[in-house]
Structure formats: structure tokens, C-alpha cells
Amino acid sequence: MNLANLFFEGFKEIFTTEKGWGMPVMWLIGLVLVYLAVKRDMEPMLLLPIGIGCILVNMPFSNVIDQMSADGGTTAGILDWLFEVGIEASEAMPILLFIGIGAMIDFGPLISNPKLMLLGGFAQTGIFITVILALLFGFGMNDAASIGIIGAADGPTSILVAQALGSGYLGPIVVVAYSYMALVPIIQPPVIKLFTTKKQRLIRMDDQIVKPVPKIVKILFPIIITLISGIIAPKSLALIGFLMFGNLLRECGVLDQLSKTAQHELVNLITLLLGVTIASTMRYDMFLRTETLLIITLGLAAFIFDTIGGILFADVMNLFLKKKINPMIGAAGISAFPMSARIVHKLGRKEDPTNYLLMHAVGVNVSGQVASAIVGGLIIAFVTALSA
């Protein structure tokens, strides 16, 4: 087949196939993701490979999906193979990524002030509200639960839950989850200002100093959290276990090289492969549906309700605390680490340049990381039990 025939067949596939017009639309979506990554610096490590992968899987006769074998049949292309091995069969990629995330986290601020864990837990409220909203919009339980987990603000957890529950909307869910994570600096500030007063935003926490945590406590913390999570939410054990294993690499003090490898080489490699692999679910016939627009809307609602949940529970806690906490730090309970903590700190400094909220916000932020993984496991267990 000469070059002219190849072009003809490609254009024929686009203009004569049912919904073939969707291919150019997905090219445009892929280019927008690349633009946001390169020009706007929005989660470039993920949006760039997702954008390129989106274009690759929507080319006519693309062999990244399937390719001709020697006997005239077809075999899985590279992206389908990566998806099958790394996500569908074992969920290995999102789980392995948690080793690197754990190695990046310092749980010291949380251990020093354990009540912050409550804020991380209540900041997951948006997940459950969004599940209910998705059910009202007509999604099935498995899909509704998968959409709700977008509110965890944790890409790997979103992937794991959607895959474990067999959602038919994995592609849109993952793209929405990572896109909104990148938009946290835009989404959260107006919500925080709307649900706090200037007087609340000026609350100082200088008298609640984050004390140094003994090394033995930092070593025991990931082990104890793993044991507790395994008992109360065994379905979350893969995520929590690998997250805490990564943290143990960091804190044990004898595996610095492995800790640095987990934080850099491992995270970079898995993130690269994960992004381009997820794009295999973004084929035009699967992605361009009315439900995708609903998922975009519900995902935004999940982030907003999570932020509100953390702030309002901080208000409730202040009713019983002698040393008041700044309600803004409750907004850092979403799992977008460390962006959300930095946003809260920045807003506090804007109201009072001498107010330093970063370490307190980080404590809430890392508690949200743990809470989101536990909630993900609980949702998998609950929905699976309902379907049994």
C-alpha cells in the first residue's frame, strides 16, 4: 500500500466511521493537555504523557492499541499491554507510586499534633456527598463510587478504586482527578475565603509549636498505621502498606540511597508510564460521552465539598479547644500534597505576613493522604459487599 492510499484509508476511517469525528476532537484534547503541562506548568509530569498518549490512541489504525501478529491475527499494542499488566491485572503502577509518595512525606507535624488527623478525615466528606450526587444523576453504584473518589485529590487512589470496581469511566475519572489536582491553587482559595471570616483567617497558632519527634516514634508510626489500617480497612492495605513502607525507608536512617531512589527515579519512572498508559482508556468512542461532562462537574463538586468539610470541622473543633486552630488548615485535608498546605500558608500570610501556618497545614495535608487511601479501601470493600 503506497503513501497516498495510507492517507486515504486514514481519512476514510475518520470521516466514514460512526463517531469517527471524535478522533480529531481527542487530538485537540490531547494538545490542550500538552499546552497546560508545558505552558502553564500544571502537573506536567502527568498531563504531558497523558496528552501525548491521548493523541496516539486516537490515530486511525494506531498500533499502540493493537498490532498485526505474524500469523495474521492481532496482538495487544504497547499501551494496551502496559494497561493490562500494570493496571488491569495487578494495579501495580498506582500502588508502586505510593512507595515514592511515602518516602517524600514527613509525618512529624502530624505526630506532634495528632488531633490534626481528624481534619484529614473530615476533609474526605466530599467523596461521600459526590457518590450520592452521582447516584442521583443515574450512575450505577460502582461508577458513582469511582467518581466520588476523585474528591480524594489523589490520582493513584482514583485509578485503583475505579479499576477495582470495574468502572467504565476510568479514562475520564483519571483525567479529571489529575486536572483538578493541578487546579487546586485556583479552586481552593475562593472556597476558603467564602467559608471563613477575616477574623478566623487571622488566628495564629504560634502557641502550638510543632515539636521535634523522636526518631523511634517516626519509625514506629508507619508500622502502627499499617497494622491499624489492615484491621479496619484491609482493602486499603496495598495503598497504605506501600505508602508507609516508603515512609519507613525515609525514617529508618539506614536506607538513605533507597529512599532517594524512591523519591526520584521510582516516582519519575512510574509517573511517566502511568500517564501514558492511562491514555489507552481515552479512545474517542469511550471518552466522548455526555457522562464525561457530568464527571467533570461532579469532580469539581467533590473538591469543593472536601475543602468545605475540613473547614467546617475545624470550626466544630474550636468549640471545644482552648487553643484555637485556624480553620483554613482544615482545607489542607485533601490529599493534594503539598500544594494544599502551601495554599493555606499563602492565604494566611496574605492576611498577616507574620502568621506562619505551613507546618500545621502540612500536618493536616499528610493526614489527608493517609485518610484518602483508607477511605478508598473502605469504599472498595463496601461496594464489593453490596454487589456480592
Image (tube, grey):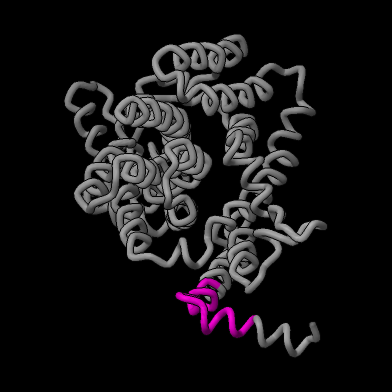
Q: Quadrant of residue 372?
A: top left
Residue 375: where, in percent of width, then height?
A: 38, 30
Residue drawn 76% across the image and 34% down it = 261
Which one is nearer the viewer's eye here, 356 or 98? 98
Q: Residue furthest front?
A: 71
Q: Identify the magenta region.
A: 10-26
* Residue 208 horizontal side relative to residue 317, left or right: right
Which one is nearer the viewer's eye here, 365 or 113? 365
Residue 199 inside the magenta-drawn segment: no
Residue drawn 72% across the image and 41% down it = 264
Residue drawn 42% across the image and 37% down it = 165
Residue 349: where, in percent of width, then height?
A: 40, 49
* Residue 287 horizontal side relative to residue 43, left or right: left
Q: Is residue 314 visible?
A: yes
Residue 129: where, in percent of width, then height?
A: 24, 42
Which one is nearer the viewer's eye here, 54 or 168? 168
Residue 21 inside the magenta-drawn segment: yes
Q: Is residue 328 visible?
A: no
Residue 138: where, in percent of width, then height?
A: 23, 51
Q: Quadrant of residue 228?
A: top left
Q: Quadrant of residue 11?
A: bottom right
Q: Residue furthest left?
A: 319
* Residue 348 horizontal side relative to residue 54, left or right: left
Locate the N terminus by quadrant. Answer: bottom right
Locate the C terminus by quadrant. Answer: top left
Q: Main secondary structure of the magenta part?
A: helix
Residue drawn 68% across the image and 59% down it = 66
- Say if 219 sits above or below 380 in the image: above
